[in-house]
Image (spheres, rainbow, N blue to C red):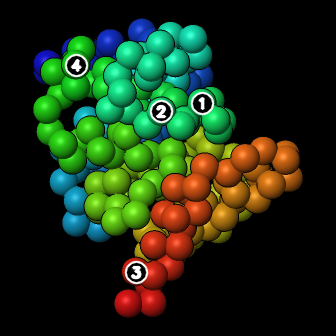
């Protein structure tokens, strides 16, 4: 599918405000990819599609999850916000014709990260945190860290997510903690 078709299909899946967020993630992903050596074209495609299913009814996302045992079946035990990344990658492959594993992985792991994140995984995950429309405590620090290190900026992002979930008394998806620890390990060499 041509990029313009993907853009139009994605735009039709979400409210206008969320589309502005997506455009911010696209812009930021391309910049980060150019700065840190990832493929800007793949970053653009993954960023366009990263929230494709974000506004789908939870029941619809759960149905796709249950019907496809290759998807992580433990996701419903945690925050529903985790669903859209895995379901989105599945939809990108099976309904939008995306067969590039790097792009699919960047969509799949943009909410939780994973151990051994690729440069493209980091680009889209970080761009989702720091795109220009984001406004939350700590985002300016993350933007400053991202000028020099995607890893340090992502650690700050995961710390922010973990702190938020702790304050709300919610479960923390174990992969988020593992991703944070793996990034610290990368920095320690």
Q: Residues within 10 Å of mark 1 (few under 14, many from 20)?
A: some
Q: Is residue 133 left or right of residue 100?
A: right
Closer-to-camera residue (130/177): 177
Number of numbered tags placed on the structure image? 4
Q: What's the CA distance linking mark 3 and mark 4? A: 33 Å
Q: CA distance from mark 2 to mark 4?
A: 19 Å
Is 55 situated above or below 27? above
Label 3, secondary structure: give it: helix
Q: Are marks 3 and 4 in contact (CB under 8 Å)?
A: no
Query: 17 or 156: which is nearer to us?
Result: 156
State the residue position of label 2. 73
Q: Nearer the viewer, mark 1 or mark 3?
A: 1
Element carrying mark 2: loop
Quadrant containing the C terminus in the rendered view: bottom left
The reply to whether residue 113 is visible in this rendering is: yes
Residue visible at 29% across and 61% down in the picture: 118
* Label ID, residue 76: 1
134 horizontally vs 122: left or right: right
The image shows residue 162 at horizontal and vertical percentages of: 70, 57
* Residue 147 in picture, x, y percent from top left: 46, 71
């Amino acid at each position: 599918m041509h990029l313009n078709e993907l853009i139009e299909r994605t735009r039709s899946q979400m409210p206008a405000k969320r589309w502005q967020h997506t455009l911010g993630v696209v812009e930021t992903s391309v910049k980060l990819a150019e700065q840190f050596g990832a493929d800007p074209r793949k970053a653009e495609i993954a960023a366009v599609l990263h929230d494709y299913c974000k506004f789908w009814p939870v029941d619809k996302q759960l149905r796709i999850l249950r019907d496809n045992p290759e998807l992580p079946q433990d996701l419903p035990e945690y925050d529903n916000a985790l669903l859209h990344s895995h379901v989105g990658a599945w939809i990108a492959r099976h309904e939008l014709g995306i067969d590039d594993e790097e792009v699919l992985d960047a969509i799949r792991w943009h909410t939780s990260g994973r151990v051994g994140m690729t440069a493209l995984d980091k680009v889209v995950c970080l761009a989702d945190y720091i795109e220009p429309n984001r406004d939350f405590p700590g985002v300016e620090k993350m933007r400053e860290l991202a000028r020099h290190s995607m890893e340090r900026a992502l650690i700050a992002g995961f710390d922010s997510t973990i702190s938020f979930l702790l304050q709300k008394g919610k479960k923390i998806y174990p992969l988020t903690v593992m991703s944070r620890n793996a990034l610290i390990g990368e920095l320690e060499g």
